[in-house]
Amino acid sequence: MSLARLKLAQEGPVVYANLRGDIDMSNADELRSELSAMTPNSALSLILDLTEVDYLDSAGIHLVHRLREDLRASGQRLQLVIPEASMINATLRLAGLDWRDDTAETADAARAALEHS
Amino acid sequence: MSALPTRELGAGQVALELDDSITAPAEQLRDLVRMSDPALSELEFDRLLDELLVRVKGLLGVDTAAILLYDHPTNELVARAAKGIEEEVEQGVRIPVGRGFAGRIAKERVAIFIADVDHADIMNPILRQKGIRSLIGVPLIVEGDLIGVLHVGSLVPRTFDLRDLSVLELAAARAAPAIERGRLLLALEREHRNAVMMQRSLLPGKLGRIAGVTLSARYLPARDEVGGDWYDMIELRGGQVGIAIGDVVGHGLAAATLMGQLRTALRAYAIDGNSPSRTLELVDRFAVNLDQQAMATAIYAVVDSDEGVARIASAGHLPPVLLSEEGEPRVLEIPLAPPLGAFRYKQCPEAEVQISSGETLLLYTDGLIERRGVPLPHSIRELVHAVRGARTPEDACLMAMDRLVPQRGPGDDIAVIALQIDPVDDVLELELRAYPTTLARVRQTLGRWLRGHDVEREIAAEITIAVSEACANAVEHAYGPGRGMFTVRAEQIGATIHVSVMDQGQWRAPRGEHRGRGLKIMRAAMDSLDVRSNERGTEILMTRGVNRR
């Protein structure tokens, strides 16, 4: 019933984070600090799986941007998982954003993309 | 003037030894104390003491008179009433038992006479400052317990005789039980008042408006004492609404305190997103682990207006009543867990009940229906009869209270809460608190409204995004720390959805890339967007055609 739920798993050098629910101004900051805190310096990259996110607004977009910057600053990489049919693609389209460079269709595709980079 | 029998106490003080045979002007004191009104108020208690002092002063022809009451926790005397030396009370003079004039009277439990204040061991500087030359005081004793000291003083040097002493003794003897009784009543009254105050402060005074549902509630304390009934309303994430009702076993301040703890615990577990059954399991664990004996019945229900479902868990509580849109009541059979705090649950059952818009879910405590000698099923039937025809939560509360509460007030306290899922109106009008957590509710309610107007899913999603962004703007920019309200209005005119988001704050152009993005999203999602701002507030007007672009 909570607006969003975050699950994290360490997979070797990769941290896998699964978000579900709604991301808006009421929880975006909280989620970003949690994601940053849970990604240790030793991790090479973070996979943020947004497959089960039902709603994402401008605060959620801001979260992803800030997270990407934070990770880049410490030499880490952000890999997103957003399926084609995801509801949040509507938000991205309306905001005129293109995240395809670091977005995969599935979690496995994201893992593969990281391995081959 | 007869000399008083005395024994030396040193430091200019003498203890007076009383002779029972001395006759006193009892008739003058006969009506000294009148305490007929059982509902003694603080004011009346003070008036009683004042009257007592005025009479004693008049009878003895003295200039000052004062009553100090014994405060058990500190072992001190506290000035409570005074004539001629009002400063004693105003300054809240406290005298440790055993010290000074009054303190010695209290400790020795004897009358003490001071002929010359200048040469005596006196703690309270006010007595000297007022120019008092001679003092005489007696202890106030009830059934062997010291309750205070009564003393009088003269501005001219004076010797008190046996008649004076007996008047004072008699006044003390007559007044002491009344003072004690008054004090007890006052303490009880204070406890009652505190308990009622606490109860009031713990219950949501006015149910906040939650978009998509209508709520009504009542709390009525028992005519004699408070109990431990409570109701609560919890706005949950994801647009669901929780309502709770509970009844702590017992009465008075203890029950009210416990109610506060259980209500808070339930609220905390509920806000965390736990299911009704899980919430009650956790509250039960909380109650079992409390230091004091705690037992309560409660219901927690989560209503999902989108799904049209209420999930209900009950810890030994009376069954909820569901009223149809036409006001036809039906008692809901909810599987019961044992009362909270009785023992640790293994598992609390949960029922799922269909509730469509226009139907009213009513929860109540036993104070509403229980009558001595009337079997419970019969009482519940009376409730069903009382609320038949109620079509709104307010009607349900009103009819239940009006028809079931005895005229002289309830014997037990009463809590009632009723909820209805709002029907999808032609025009959606929401008045909301400017908190970030409100946005999810707006999306949920708007989503429901748009579906109700057959707006295609993708278009509805885009409108929802735009409106949520506009609301975020109202929440983020329109208000300072005080927060305020904002309104959302949506209407379909022809093939166009018109939405207005209005607040009472000053429009600030979105700053930075982040906020600018919100505006961009709104523009992209809608066909038109207009921001109107003046000193009274800001309104964002948006339209979107429902046919595919």
Image: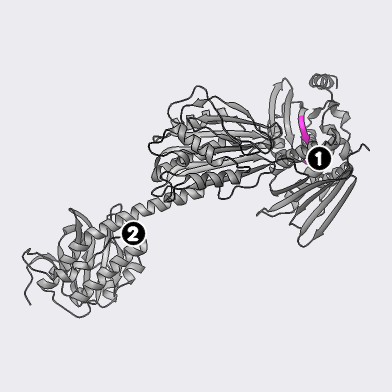
Q: Residue at x 26, y 65 (%)?
A: B67
* Colour scheme employed for the rendering of this structure: one colour
Say if B188 sits above or below A57 in the image. Answer: below
Instruction: Describe the element under mark 1 as helix, strand or loop.
Output: helix
Say if B335 sits above or below B241 in the image. Answer: above
Q: Earlier in the sequence, mark 2 or mark 1?
A: 2
Position of the N terminus of chain B, as image quadrant, is: bottom left
Instruction: Describe the element under mark 2 as helix, strand or loop.
Output: loop
- Please state which of residues A19 and B95 is positioned toward the viewer in this rendering: A19
- Please state which of residues A102 and B109 is positioned toward the viewer in this rendering: B109
Q: CA distance from mark 2 to mark 1?
A: 62 Å
Q: Residue at x 10, y 65 (%)?
A: B8
Q: Which residues are magenta?
A: A53-61
Residue B40: numbered disc? 2
Is residue B531 among what the camera can see?
Answer: yes
Is residue B118 among what the camera can see?
Answer: no
> Which chain is mark 2 on?
B
- Please state which of residues B371 and B222 is positioned toward the viewer in this rendering: B371
> Which chain is mark 1 on?
B
Image x and y of residue B301, in percent: 59, 33
Q: Residues within 10 Å of mark 2 (few under 14, many from 20)?
A: some
Q: Report the amino acid beneath label 2.
A: Leu
Q: Is residue B462 magenta?
A: no
**Residue A91, quarter of picture:** top right
Q: Report the amino acid beneath label 1.
A: Ile
Residue B465: numbered disc? 1
Image x and y of residue B306, in percent: 71, 34
Q: Residues within 10 Å of mark 1 (few under 14, many from 20)?
A: many
**Residue B518, quarter of picture:** top right
Q: Is residue A59 magenta?
A: yes
**Residue A92, quarter of picture:** top right
Image x and y of residue B47, in percent: 32, 67
